[in-house]
Amino acid sequence: MPLERFASHATDVDRAEREMQQIWPTTRLGRDPDHRFAYEQTVLSDASASFIRLHIGTRLERASTRLDDAFMIGRRSGGGYVYRTDGKAGSRSAVMLFHPGSVQADIHDLKIDLVSLSRSEAQRVAAGLVGAESATLRFGGVGARTAKLERYWAALHEHVLREVLADDELASNDLIRGQAVRSLLVAAFAAFPIEILGDAGYADGALPAAVRRAVEYAESHAAEAISVDDLAAAARLTSRGLQAAFRRHLDTTPSEYLRRVRLARAHEELREADPTAGATVRGIARRWGFGNGARFARAYREAYGVAPVATLRG
């Protein structure tokens, strides 16, 4: 993802409006000849996010723009403003959420750090969190859910600005910058009233493709020393996303599902094995990943109603 940096300043509204339109193309600024105008803006931007430091040093009414493919979170450090976002009255807190849609504001000597987050990137991250093939976002209020979550967001945002973006080497590293944006998105989903609506992408009761990939991997590699991380990699989800997907669609966890598969394979082998040829419950259990014989026997009895030795002896 190519990284762009630019800075601009102006003492006339027309130029400031043109500069701001590089980030928000529909920006319109009100005109007030009775107040001296001053504007400064610095921007660091890529395809997934833009980090904007903005100072409008005047009283300005009827400023407006529209967010079509992004949403924003702002952290005010000076001045003030009254705004509406997507038809909702804005937050009076120092940290505020701007919904996709129209934004209108009356500004008074405003200093604010903004993060404009790509809606498509946000939906991609959200889908991974809930274990869906895709996801949409539903925006509720405009402030953080709690004061503690607001402080959490502000601290993370400050960390990204100071420790990542202020360092040219780190900011230019796509992997590091991408992880920073992902961390901000995950924090935003937790801190603000943004509901994730998973679109499973399947029909007629079939499992979504991500869960299906994990299930097939578990079935075909059950005899190997695989972990939940391996299942998540096969599903192309994060481990957390896979946990959520299994809970949602199978009402279990990935580790429990893998344990059931291995128990079923041990059951099949016990039924086919010949104890006179040296087959033992302990050997079969260990072959399928059950190192504790007592726990295996208990789980087996719960699943099949008999002791594993009874199945072996047929």
Image (cartoon, helix red, strand yellow):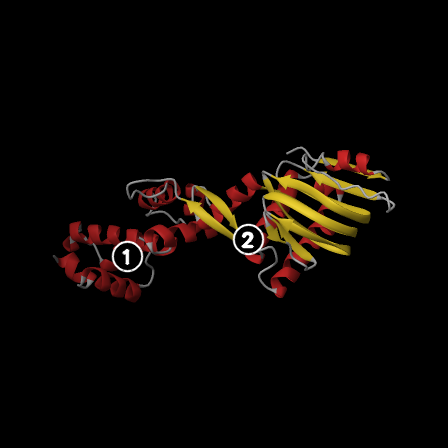
Name the residue type under label 2.
Answer: Phe
Q: Is residue 302 above or below residue 106?
A: below
Residue at horizontal 68%, vertical 34%?
A: 25
Q: Nearer the viewer, residue 105 or 308?
A: 105
Crowd rating for badge 2 (residues with CA inside 10 Å; few <14, some 14–19, many 20+): some
Q: Is residue 174 visible?
A: yes
Q: Please tell me which residue lies in front, 247 or 136.
A: 136
Compared across the picture, whether 7 is left or right of 231 comes to: right
Q: Name the residue nearer the viewer: 8 or 169.
A: 8
> Mark 1 or mark 2, which is nearer to you?
2
Q: Quadrant of the N terminus?
A: top right
Q: Which mark is residue 285?
A: 1
Number of numbered discs overlaid on the protein picture? 2
Tell me if 34 is positioned left or right of 201 in this view. right
Tell me if residue 274 comes above or below residue 173 in the rendering: below
In percent of width and height, residue 28 lies at 72, 38
Going by the numbered disc 1, the residue's amino acid type is Ala
Looking at the image, which residue is at 68% across and 51% down? 83
Residue 92 shows which numbered tag? none
Element assignment for label 2: helix
- Considering the numbered disc 1 on the image, is that residue within a helix, a strand or a loop? helix
- Residue drawn 66% across and 37% down? 46
* Percent coordinates x, y for residue 73 in the rendering: 65, 50
Q: CA distance from mark 1 to mark 2?
A: 43 Å
In the rendered image, which residue does mark 2 sit on?
189
Q: Is residue 166 visible?
A: no
